[in-house]
Amino acid sequence: MAKNVYRVKGNFKSFLFILAVVITGGFLVYTQQLVAHLQDQSRDFLRFKVKVFEENISNEEITDLNFFFNNVIQTADYPSIYADAQMVPQFWRNIGIPQSNGQQIDPDTLAMVARLMEEFEKVNPPIPITYQGMILGYYIYGESAIIKKLRWLPVIEIIVVGMFILIGYAGFHSIKKSEERLIWVGMAKETAHQLGTPLSSLMGWVEYLKLSPSQLEKVLPEVRKDLQRLEVITNRFSQIGSLPDLKPENLGEIILETAQYFQSRIPQKNGKVQLFTELDPGISKVNLNRDLFSWVLENLVKNGLDALENEGGTITISSGMLGDAQVFIDVKDTGKGIAGSAKKDLFKPGFSTKKRGWGLGLSLAKRIVEDYHGGKLTLKETQVGTGSTFRIALKIS
């Protein structure tokens, strides 16, 4: 059982990792496709402008081709350079280098523009400007600001997703560690509590025999009961975390044994507490682990006793059929009930409405019923000031 749980956790982590890779990969592919689409659009648009420029070179009405070049071709927001037929830069725009404004170009400036031109050529092939079959020059352009930003988008996405994954992992890891700590503390307290009752009883019998050695024969059956109780407790803890041994058991018999165990141990401080059983005699045997399932019933009864808060009331354990394939066991108390805010955390390790509770009883009971017996443990109904009913549903053998 424990191995299956860890295997499921491992598979879930692998699934999350694969999902993150797929999502990130999807973003990368989509962004690259978007960048390629924008580049194609830019290239087509520039070719159209160059074509318009070529068609108007011979137009006598256009006397200033430089004006036409600057206002028709170079109105785009991307960096661009116009070079003559020998690939010598003549005009440029949006490259971070001041324009020559008709003056002779400084050699250092020309070298810087030429280096940028080479970088642009790696991204986009130069667009030739022709007239009557003769190449007049070349239009070389780089990526627009928006395309450059889009190229950084996948990196930003990966960083953001990675940060969220790290934060999420750290958060879940912290929650897991906190739950583990609560479980260990709770198990230690539950162990002490479980062992405390029979050990205290045995110590009492020892003291009694010191004072009345002649009562040995009378005391031995009670000592034997306490030793049997210790054996049951040992068996319970030894089976937690391992695959339990399930076999057909008489459900009614286990319920009656639990009720009888509590009959002589129910505190009667400020009010009378009564424990009733309402069993369906027609229920067939159910696949159970006797020790673990009786532990579940004990935890539910103890929960009911805590809910009564020494005010008196009743606890009823009932059983019956749920259709043809399931049986139910209800543990109902007439205690204080459970507030709405506490319902969602009721079965979480460490949650308790008691000042000194360790919050393990219901969590442990749910684990035993659902993970070990394949059943369901739920809060069937509750009302503040009226009481609560917990229901166990199990498959029939």
Image (cartoon, grey):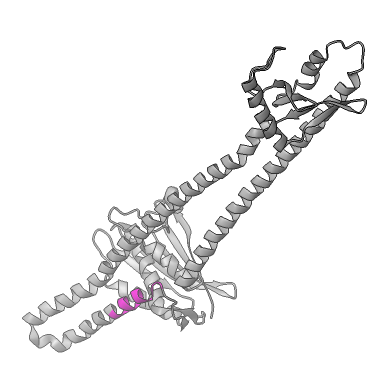
Q: Position of residue 113 (x, y in %)?
A: 66, 25
Magenta segment, principal secondary structure?
Answer: helix
Range of the magenta residues?
A: 231-241
Foreground residue, 287 or 163?
163
**Visible in this render: residue 365?**
yes
Image coordinates of residue 387 in percent, x first then y, are 41, 57
Was residue 242 drawn as part of the magenta stretch in this picture? Answer: no
Q: Quadrant of residue 367?
A: bottom left
**Residue 265: x %, y % from top left:** 27, 70
Total number of numbered discs in the rendering: 0
In the image, residue 38 sits, relative to residue 303, either above or below, namely: above
- Can the viewer see residue 144? no
Say whether residue 46 is left or right of residue 25: right
Q: Quadrant of residue 145?
A: top right
| In this picture, residue 247 sits left or right of residue 301 | right
Q: Residue at x 28, y 82 (%)?
A: 228
Closer to the camera in the image, 77 or 59: 59
Q: Is residue 65 above or below residue 122?
A: above
Foreground pick, 155 / 169: 155
Residue sitting at the far bottom:
217
Residue at screen point 19% across, 86% down: 220
Q: Residue furthest left?
A: 211
Position of residue 242 in the picture relative to residue 57 (left or right): left
Q: Is residue 23 above or below residue 104?
A: below
The x and y percentages for residue 361 are 36, 63
